[in-house]
Amino acid sequence: MKKHVYQIAAGFITLLLLYGCILSQSPGSGSVSLEAGDELNFSIQVFPTSAAITWYFDDDEVAANEGMKVYNYAPDDSDIGDHTLRVVESSMFGTYSHTWNIEVVASTKVEISTPAIAEDILYAAYAGIGYMNSDSSGDDENIYRIMMADPIAVAGELIMDTLFTDPDTLEKLAQLILGISTSFTVIDTDGNLSALYINPGIQNIITGRRPFSGSFSVNFSEPGYAFGDCTYTSEADVNDLTGTFNGYFKASLSGLEEFFVKAVNLQIADTLTAQYSFGTVDYGQWSVSYTIYYGTDDPTYSSGDPLYPINVALIPLDIVGMDYESEFRDYTLGGSFAVDGQEYLFNPGFRYQQQELVVEDVTYVVLLINGEIQVPGIDGFVLIETPQDLITPLDGKTIVRDSSGILTSGSMTLSAGNTIEIEFDSGRADFSGDMGSWSVDNWQDTLEPF
């Protein structure tokens, strides 16, 4: 047995002598492509470990890395082009080398190039949470109306209109009471076509409630559908507004007694246009998703549900059938919309959260905003990140707002090819980064783009 071990060891030493003493290298490939502004570690493992190591970049010795097994390369725009990196290992066994061919290409990362773009990103990122104007507690931000409030409200209005104005509503409601899947269809005087499908589940004999799943679609006509000061139109004969939902209802021969929506997924096609007084909005595969919890007021509350209502504000109160005091929100967005040709894009999964916290008998309303966004003037996505410290929100720089919507403290980071840090202080936004530092007072009003 020992003889075989000796033979293997002798063979290994022979291989080292014949093929060199650089045991491995990283990256393993001899060709590497790297963007300007990025960095990469090149490294080797040698035998013996005491071997002398020298690095050469484009045949020039890199003295700072002499004797080191790792070379860090961080090219900038002046390095764009082809280069070589060679490492030489010398020991009693001889001298051996490895060469990487490096291609440095222009960075594809976007840069936040001006303070104005940084300010636009901040406003577009925060406005989607609603309840934000400093002069009102209402959801009156125009961007919020475009992103959330109006599409959800018009969908809710059309669902209820379709449910109750279908020519055969009474017969179809009777089918729902019996647990039979039912479709409702309405064409209004302007030619807007709404369709609703509800699939009821098994009725709870004790409570009389039935779970349900459903879907809806709206094909807007060219004359359009008026909703407040907005008119929705479409020139294409397609479903412009679609969605799925689930929940439960309670009905009797006297009518619908309860109708609780529990989860919503809303989709807006790129055929839909919304005409506002402040501009024309063209949607691009826009989506909104959220789950609704009604807290302990929900008749179907179970121990696994949150104790407080979440996202109740996102559907009309006449549908909810209950009042609420606190405002908890958690929803995700994705897609794009353009206002008078100026496009805003939200990478799918862009998430907004808002909740109340009680810390040492003090109540805070905290905001969490995370995801990627693109605004006019920049050609790629910017990552939005906000701290999440639900134990000590002030120390952890979690965003805190007051009852009027003012962001009183907290921070936000905008990350692209460069990074901008934003600190909030009682209605003031303090920016800092490689463009320097600046502040905007009363920014929640003054930065409104339209």
Image (tube, grey):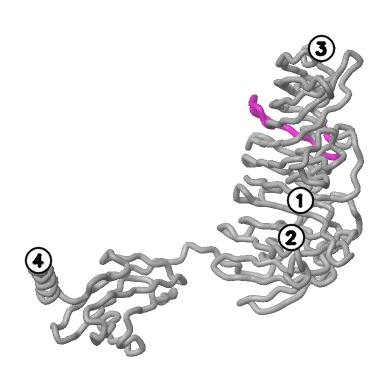
Q: What element carries label 1?
A: helix
Name the disc covering residue 143, or none.
Answer: 1
Q: Where is residue 396 in the image (x, y as percent from the top left)?
A: 72, 70
- The residue that label 4 is drawn on is 4
- CA separation in Å, label 3 and label 1: 41 Å
Q: Are marks 3 and 1 in contact (CB under 8 Å)?
A: no
Q: In this view of the protein, can residue 356 be seen by the observer?
A: yes
Q: Distance between the residues labelled 3 and 2?
A: 48 Å
Residue 219 appears in view: no
Q: In the rendered structure, which segment of residues is drawn in magenta?
A: 226-243
Quadrant in which residue 116 is drawn: bottom right
Q: Helix or strand or loop: what does disc 4 sit on?
A: helix
Q: Is residue 348 magenta?
A: no
Residue contact between numbered discs 2 and 1, judged by CB atoms under 8 Å: yes
Q: Earlier in the sequence, mark 3 or mark 1?
A: 1
Q: Closer to the camera: disc 3 or disc 1?
A: 3
Q: Mark 3 points at which residue?
A: 174
